């Protein structure tokens, strides 16, 4: 196994999120990736565990994954102190946040009959609301947010294994995720900016282009090689080049920019590819995902 990340330190992942959203499964995925995984970690203990693990002469793991416990009354105070102490050690944890919709979480709790960690004097729904409120600042700082509402265990495993390749990039600063999707399949809940491309010429109505996707040059030329597509792309890139430094200046860790068309196969894919190609050599770590390209 490789001993350390850039700067001589081990990779550290803090894995947190809403109870019932799949954190335990995600920890097992990181174990399969060669990480030592520890669950139920109070924030205040994280720097000590990181320091101990980082001091080992020979590491038998690729890194350390800590599942964070939110039941402390001073959770947010401990969380801020934890980040400060890790920074003093020269270690920047990669934060992964898992969540699900309210309806899905209620259904999972009904199926498992397990209590919520914050239940007691609170009802289940009140405990869920309290947890979401407590974790809002952590979610904002996360480099990767996974909505597991529609995921099976296997979906979560596959997605996290794929997206970990994003987190292995050692560059710091704003991480930009370019996403294509189809409105008929639902707007991605993890999107920060959503652009509706259904005003562009639709290749679906061209029999020669219908079997292709926005990754094919013929479809890209159809969408972006003439107006209004060409002008839209110019203005879109101008907009992103203007706002992204402002988001980075405000301390944002990640931005997800989603482009949607009807089915998520032609127009959104062509635009997402073009934006990705334009920004991939910028100062940001830029990643591309076509969420609905293979769906009918």
Image: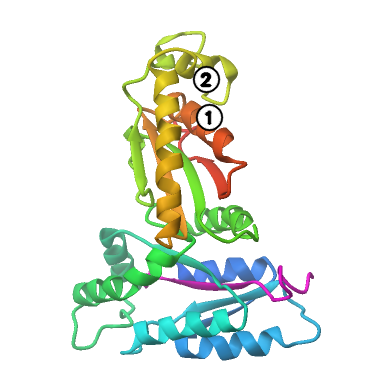
Mark 1 sits on what residue? 274
Horizontal and vertical percent for residue 110?
28, 69
Please tell me which residue lies in front, 272 or 84.
84
Mark 2 sits on what residue? 220
Q: Residues within 10 Å of mark 1 (few under 14, many from 20)?
A: some
Q: Is residue 42 visible?
A: no
Residue at 64% x, 57% y is: 169
Mark sitting on residue 28 = none
In the figure, 13 relative to 244: above or below?
A: below
Residue at 33% x, 66% y is: 108
In the figure, 187 relative to 2: above or below?
A: above
Horizontal and vertical percent for residue 98?
43, 64
Horizontal and vertical percent for residue 76?
35, 82
Horizontal and vertical percent for residue 293?
49, 32
Q: Magenta residues: mostly which secondary structure?
A: loop
The magenta segment: 1-21
């Amino acid at each position: 196994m490789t001993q350390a990340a850039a700067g001589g330190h081990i990779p550290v992942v803090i894995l947190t999120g809403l109870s019932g959203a799949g954190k335990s499964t995600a920890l097992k995925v990181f174990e399969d990736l060669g990480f030592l995984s520890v669950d139920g970690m109070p924030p205040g203990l994280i720097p000590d565990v990181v320091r101990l693990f980082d001091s080992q002469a020979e590491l038998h793991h690729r890194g350390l994954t800590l599942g964070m416990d939110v039941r402390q009354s001073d959770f947010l105070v401990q969380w801020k102190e934890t980040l400060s102490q890790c920074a003093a050690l020269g270690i920047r944890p990669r934060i992964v946040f898992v969540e699900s919709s309210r309806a899905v979480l209620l259904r999972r709790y009904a199926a498992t009959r397990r209590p919520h960690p914050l239940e007691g004097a609170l009802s289940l729904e009140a405990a869920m609301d309290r947890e979401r409120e407590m974790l809002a600042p952590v979610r904002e700082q996360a480099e990767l947010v996974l909505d597991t509402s529609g995921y099976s265990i296997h979906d979560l495993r596959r997605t996290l294994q794929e997206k970990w390749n994003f987190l292995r990039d050692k560059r710091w600063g704003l991480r930009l995720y370019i996403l294509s999707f189809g409105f008929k399949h639902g707007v991605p809940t993890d999107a920060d900016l959503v652009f509706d491309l259904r005003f562009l010429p639709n290749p679906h109505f061209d029999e020669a282009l219908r079997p292709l996707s926005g990754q094919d040059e013929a479809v890209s030329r159809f969408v972006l090689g003439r107006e209004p597509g060409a002008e839209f792309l110019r203005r879109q890139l101008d907009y992103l080049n203007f706002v992204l430094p402002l988001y980075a200046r405000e301390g944002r860790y990640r931005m997800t920019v989603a482009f949607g068309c009807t089915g998520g196969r032609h127009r959104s894919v062509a635009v997402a590819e073009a934006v990705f190609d334009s920004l991939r050599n910028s100062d940001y770590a830029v990643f591309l995902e076509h969420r609905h390209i293979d769906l009918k």
